[in-house]
Image (cartoon, coloured by chain):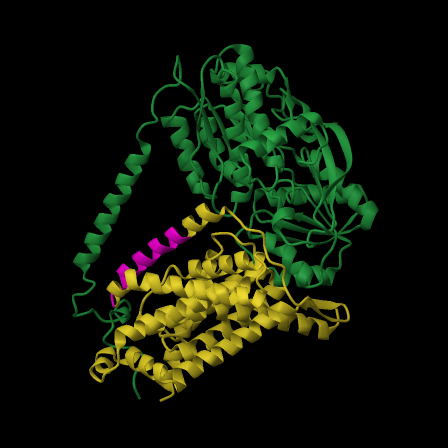
Amino acid sequence: MAHMHGTNRSRGDADRKKSTRPKSSRRQLLKLAGASGIGLMTAGCISNVGTTGESGGDGPIKLGELQDRSGALAPYGVPKHKAAKLAVKQINDNGGLLDRDVELIAPDPQSSNKKYKNLANRLVLEDNVDVLVAAVTSSAREAIRPIVDKNKQLYFYPEQYEGGVCDEYTFVTGAAPTQQVRPLVPMMINEYGPKCYILAADYNFGTISAAWTRHYLDEHGGELVGEEFIPVSVSEFGSTVNRVQEKDPDWVMSLLVGANHNSYYKQAHSAGAHRPMASSTAVLTGFEHKTLPTPVLKDMYVGGNYMEELPTERNEKFVDAFRGMFPDTPYVTQSAVDEYNAIQYWAKAAEKVGTVDQQDVQTRLEEGLIIESPEGDVRLSGETHHMWHDIHVARVDEEHNVNLIKTENNLEPSWLKSKCSLNTEESTWEDPVTKQFLFEG
Amino acid sequence: MPILTQILELITVVLNSFGIIALSALGLAIIFGMMGIINLAHGEFMMIGAFTTTITYHEGVPLVVSILLGALAAGILGIVVERLVIKRLYDRVIESMVATWGISLILSQSVLILFGPHLPGIGVPFGALTYQNYSASMYNVVLAGIAAVLLVCIYGLFKHTTFGLHARATIQKDQTAQALGVDTPNVYFLTFAIGSGLAGLAGGLIAPTMAIVPTLGTAFIIDAFTAVIVGGANVLIGVPAASVSLGLLNGVVSQWGGSMMGRVALLVTAIIILRIAPTGISGYLTETGE
């Protein structure tokens, strides 16, 4: 009986005998490895040329930006990057900042936290950026915050998250759970019932946001019937859908993140396991209502500080400008406006103190500042480095239209407020507080 | 929870797992088993199939035709890649890995540049199977059925056609086959085309259940490779055996422990099988069953 492995093939050699045929010899392998190594080093050197030097005097002001334009997080990062380009263009078209042009230095971290670290080091240490605006996920933010802290780099984190960051050099323009999750939970309990199943992405944002959800469920008489943490790379939800059906919740809290997790909505719907849902991540940041087929997001309730549908004149102008510069935009996201706000705060503070020196700008920001954002007039709190927000709750219908239901005005980051006073002697530029308080429920 | 419902749930999860593993692995197994080429671009061929299916579907083409177009697109791409690159790398395992890895990068980044980070998805067809308070997506069961049919067809192709005979001769002893008049370069060429086409078909079939992103191939490549190695060199025995065993364990464990534990179980199973049978299931069966 013929032996199934071809003995005249070198593919069997790897695990057994040495080949007597010189096809893939060690010498060739070493040559190949050497050539690849030289190639990689050259590529690395080439990409580093041309962006060194201090940013002072008459050169352009450097705005360093890191947002994912490829990989699983691209749906969140691409709109943010567009918002940055719009903000910088608007500044430069109006004569620049302090009579200098703003230059956007924005390499793509490709949804990889390792690249975030490398690129953050590069932007801070080689390019000497005057401000860093970076990260979608909380894991990316926590990957680069040590770099920010060590180098005293003024940094904006422009995204909704799990709350708790109290860092001398970091300003957060996104909303926290006390602002976003809090209005959603009692609304869902009143509308659909107390039984909730939580589906969360399996990293710091998901676990802590789930803790907040449980906290609000307790507070409002809800009942947790199940909870699952799913790695960001998973796209098969067969067993999850089964469990949701088994536990039969009245509604599902979705803290899912990334393109792979979008498959859950499709798979749940096609299995007949659709439930009303609430989410602080879906739709407003990831615009799934534009990319998933109707009606898989029917009865999804979302809460956030911004949605494209806000009916104010200022917002309509902003949306027109955004779509004018980027005609094939599917949706103007909350993430994009969070980034736009960050750049607005930074530019306004710099104007007011007449310099982009990072410590001076930070000091001015800590005095509190209001900007005219597409989401409204919004205030930055000097003590927490976070923002007050108006929070809007909307419902997605079966045609995937987003319908505004109610607005709660001027919600402050209340949990952090009791713990964090960055504009006092407790935390100074030279002797800073740089922590994140982790809510445990 | 009534026991019948639990059994039904388990069956659907296992079928789903089996179907996806079998579909992902089949194209890769044919190329690796026949040609000894490790095609690291396999996931991207699936992605090309999924993208073609999605784009043509949104232009109004019926879903079945769109899926076949996805297979065709991947097959044509496979032909191009084979003629330009693979042809020069038969028998050169390491070089073929580097080359196909490069191709995978080119494909995923090109699709990203041309079509953006994601496309609007396709709705899942066929609706739900229901029984009392249990329901599951009919499509997952359909996928498993299609996977089984494909395995049978591939078996028929390789056992009962002249091409199949030539292909099996080439895999066993290519120089002897060539000496007997088999056009071995042509066999390799057709094999790579078939393997790529099957990858595209898998991508198109799975597309309705997934978010359509340029990196969607990466979700399947690990399972595909694991199934191919566990199955062993003989595609006809190996792929079904590996898909069933890995699919069963992945499905059972994920039903009770979550999808993460299911993946752990799949990989642990692979390790155990390979420890017992280093040449894969089909290698083991061949050696002991003679």
Q: Is residue A172 left or right of residue A1?
A: right
Q: Report the residue at 56% width, 73% height from top.
A: B144
In magenta stretch: residue A184: no
**How many numbered callouts?**
0
Residue A144: where, in percent of width, then height? 47, 34
Residue B125: where, in percent of width, then height? 64, 65
Chain A, hue in figure: green
Magenta range is B91-107
Q: Nearer the viewer, residue A287 or A42?
A: A287
Eyeballing the image, is A7 above or below B61?
A: below
Q: Nearer the viewer, residue A227 or B221?
A: B221
Q: Residue furthest right?
A: A190
Q: Report the residue at 39% width, 18% height from top.
A: A55
Q: Is residue A195 left or right of residue B8?
A: right
Eyeballing the image, is A239 above or below B15?
A: above
Chain B, hue in figure: yellow
